[in-house]
Amino acid sequence: MWNVFKKKDEDAAQPAEQTAAAKSDKKESIEERIERELDALPEMLKGKLKDPAIKKRFIDIAKRMEKDGVDFKSIRQMKKWMKAHEAELKAEANGGTVAKVETVVHQGPKIGRNDPCPCGSGKKYKKCCGAGK
């Protein structure tokens, strides 16, 4: 009986030449793969990868992804990995410091809707600077 869920034997389905090529791809380093596939990258990335510092950072991130077992053919897996490591990647980009977000504290008295506008127009705040708020 034919089973839809049964995996096909990949070695029997592929010729010997293709399996040898696949094995040699696994031994190929990230740097070699990036150099080989540079033409397939979008123009924006190609232009930025000409800078050696950016290229090194790109390769380092790719190595970390490979170490964590991310499939480079799956955009979804790469985006998921990037989202999970977003904070540490930003910290590395900033030189090891994470940018701290500070809360804005309003100084001075609160302006009511019907109070005169502080800009000096003579109108009520709700008709002048407070319109649309």
Image: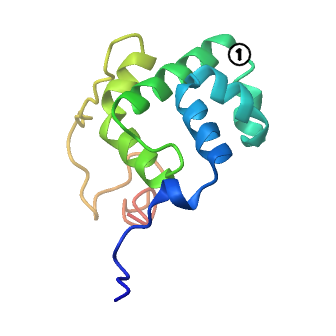
Amino acid type, label 1: Asp
Quadrant of the image for the N terminus? bottom left
Instruction: Using residue 86 as the reference point, say whether residue 120 is left or right of it.
Output: right
Give x and y (percent) for residue 95.
Answer: 41, 10
Residue situated in front as seen by the camera: 5 or 109: 5
The residue identified by callout 1 is: 51
Picture residue at 73% right of the left edge, 37% below the top: 44
User: How many numbered discs?
Assistant: 1
Does residue 101 appear to the left or right of 24 in the view shown? left
For label 1, count other residues whose C-alpha is less than 10 Å away and answer few (under 14), some (14-19) or many (20+).
few
The color scheme shown is: rainbow
Check the image and name the residue furthest to the bottom. Answer: 1
* On screen, residue 79 above or below 48: below
Q: Quadrant of residue 5?
A: bottom left
Residue 33 point in image, percent of width and height: 64, 29
For residue 66, above or below residue 78: above
Q: Quadrant of the C terminus?
A: bottom left
Residue at screen point 28% across, 64% down: 114
The answer to which of 97 and 11 lies nearer the viewer is 11
Looking at the image, residue 41 sits to the left or right of residue 97; the answer is right
Q: Nearer the viewer, residue 108 or 40?
A: 40
**Residue 13 appears at what percent x and percent y?**
56, 61
Q: Quadrant of residue 85?
A: top left
Residue at 54 percent across and 49 percent down: it is 73
Q: Quadrant of residue 113?
A: bottom left
Q: Give SS at disc 1.
A: loop
In the picture shown, does residue 99 fall above or below 40?
above
Q: Position of residue 125 (x, y in %)?
A: 37, 59
Residue 64 higher or lower than 86, as above or below = above
